[in-house]
Amino acid sequence: MGIYSPLIQNLMPNKTFFWFFLPTGLAMILFIGLPIISTGIQSFYAQHDQVVKEVKKCDPFGCTVSIVVDNELTTKLREAKPLGKFNGFGTYIDRNHLAIDEIKKFWNETDNFGAFVDQVTNLPFYKALIFTLTYCLFVTPNVLLLGFIIALSLNAVARKIRGPLIFGTILPMIVTPLVGSLVLFWMIDSQGIIGANIQNLMNDPYLSLKSSKTLTWITIIIYGIWHHSPFAFVVFYAALQTVPQEPVEAAIIDGASRFQRIKHIVLPHIYPVVTFVALISLMDNFRVFEPIIGFSAEGSAQSLSWLIYDNLVNEEVILFGSAAATSMMTIVGIAILLAPVLIRTWKEFKTAR
Amino acid sequence: MRKILVTLLFLLFGTSAFADCNIKSGSINILANDFPALRTFVETSKQCKGSADFKVTHSSEHNKIAVPALTANPSEFSARIAANSSIVPLMNQDLIRPLDDLVKKYGKGIQSSQLITIDGKVMAVAFMANTQHLYYREDVLKDLGIAVPKTYEEVVAASEKIRASGKMQYPYAAAYKAGWNLAEEFVNMFIGHGGEFFKAGGAQPNINNAKGVATLNMLKKLSELSNPDYLTHDSEAIKVEWESGNVALMTLWASRSGTLLDDEGDPNITKATKLTGPATVGGGNIPAATLWWDGFTLAKNRSDADAEATFRALAHAASNKKMVADAADQAVWLVEGFVPGPKSIGVIEAVKMGAKPYPMLPQMGLMHGALGSEIVEFLQGKESAEQALKDVEAAYISKAKEQGFL
């Protein structure tokens, strides 16, 4: 929305724009704004101190004396303060998130930087952050590049076969992410077509794409590129149709090579679209989640989104505070990642006026 | 012979199966996990529904639905089929009701050993038991002259021998999928070593010690004898490995024996598949396994009429002699009249050997969660056992603080 609004503003008066935007704006406040605020508030609270009591428990295997939560007292506490115990930034800085105390300790205890980094990257939040950033860093540029190359090549083939080719190219995007990753997951199994062939090729019967951390990361990244490239391709292909033919023809007469034409005419023309695709890809990639589930890669690769999922569903006790804190930090993370691109767009918008 | 027996039993108890329990009103809605024994149980209770409204949701994602669905008032489900671990969050949030009055009024056929009592109140009625135990391939062990292993040390030795013989590359299998499954294997092995998860009388963790290290080392040895993809293998995946003939020794749930020994798959493998009790470890005398019960609980946030109708229908199944005779293969029933068959060996051996039940503690879920993600790097060889256990305790402490247990 943020990218289109300046364009729309140039075309229509402010008042019209306001009425045009109002329904979307309201929906955004209701379904995105308010939940984010609620999540933010939640992240500052922890559960009340549990009141437990010792009781006798009997089951078919015998009796033991152990503890249960005292429900009467807990209910009273909850009625008095339904949100829980105010915790401030307590959840944000605990070991499972930013781990401020642990990092200080590591810094004082370790004598070289390498050991310090090892210790920090062993913490769950940083482990997830590193995977998330690595994924973004490798997938986003490759998606842009691959999408652009495919768009250029398809733009050059004969019109007759373009339709089926385009359909084939956007297939990865049509396939549900979970299904796509599951198909690949089975193929890379040590008895699957890819996994078994790699074992043969490397002559190592113990080689497993799923057990090695590095190989799992590479698999997920390749999957990410495969899945996201069609989106870049579709947008670039549309943009290529708007490239004016006169300057291109003039350049051909001047003897410019294909590469020079792309560099000096095509790329500058579709540049705003490149920014747009980069923005969207970065946002999508920072929230990487489905492939981790599809590849059952929880052991080797955890992303920030996966941490939220883990806090909400994998525990028998739901950790709302933890999940909320990680969500807020994911939003901040996306904002930081997008900041350079957004600032640039804003500056261009200003000068254009 | 068996057919005659079943027919006889049918004649004896057949009348009760079609008995309408005379439930006049109310609505019944059950949430349950999805495996054959539970389907049988719910179907049996349906025969008794009378004119009550009857609905059921079988889902393997039942754990994720249960707390939110029972928190609503009125709650979506009137009953939830739970187990040792899944009853805890319901107790923590005060979402289930005591059943004493209903048991007195309608629970005639239920044995007192089926009642789960907490602080003197009946909170659940158990109807089946479960555990993880060893499965072995008789033909493979016989060919190589290996005795049936009784300890995990023997399992390791046997697996190494099978591997050395060239028969199988990865002779051992267990559900080591990172997360809940892997943590469950740790829990079993740690209990087998005689470990206690928490310091006496509190919620302080107590796993970073010699027993914890021994547990991790044993898990690592076993993982090295398993398919290299073990971190992605759950119970279903290792069952497939077994049925493909890639595995000769396996630790798996007793409740899965039914599908393992059915007519599907290679008949030679099925014929050679034998069950035995759970193994001990580290010279201990209790098995490295936990006992589980499955039982029904009733939602608190639901009308008394619904609770009564639901209880009557479920109690009908939980005391049904015909059901346990017909479905003797599906589970180890705790219901009166159950005659254990060959598929029940695992659980019965475990009970005989004095296996401990899975700890029913309010903070155990947090420990289980922390184990599932923090011991992976040790198994991958990236971390020492001590460091992994330190990480588990630290992750647990942060979560327990947020939940107010520490």
Image (cartoon, coloured by chain):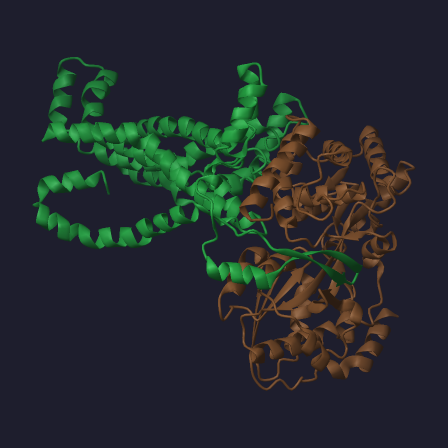
| In this view, B28 is above or below A58 | below
Residue B267 or residue B178, whichever sits in front: B178
Farthest left residue in view: A13
Q: Quadrant of the N terminus of chain B?
A: bottom right
| In this view, A226 is above or below B110 | above
* Residue B199 coordinates in the image, percent (x, y): 72, 43
Residue B123 or residue A165, whichever sits in front: B123
Residue B399 or residue A17, whichever sits in front: B399
Quadrant housing residue A158: top left
Q: Is residue B17 visible?
A: yes
Q: How many marks?
A: 0
Quadrant housing residue B317: bottom right
A86 horizontally vs A340: left or right: right
* Residue A179 coordinates in the image, percent (x, y): 49, 45
Tell me what hue chain A is rendered in: green
Q: Quadrant of the C terminus of chain B?
A: top right
Q: Which residue lies at the image location 40% right of the left edge and 38% below the top edge?
A: A330
Quadrant housing residue B244: top right
A56 horizontally vs A292: left or right: right
* Residue A72 coordinates in the image, percent (x, y): 58, 64
Q: Which residue lies at the image location 62% right of the left edge and 21% below the top edge?
A: A202
B378 horizontally vs A83: left or right: right
* Residue B393 coordinates in the image, percent (x, y): 64, 37
Q: Is residue A219 visible?
A: no
Tell me what hue chain B is rendered in: brown
Q: Which residue lies at the image location 72% right of the left edge and 66% below the top edge?
A: B117
B336 horizontally vs B399: left or right: right
| In this view, A250 is above or below B171 | above
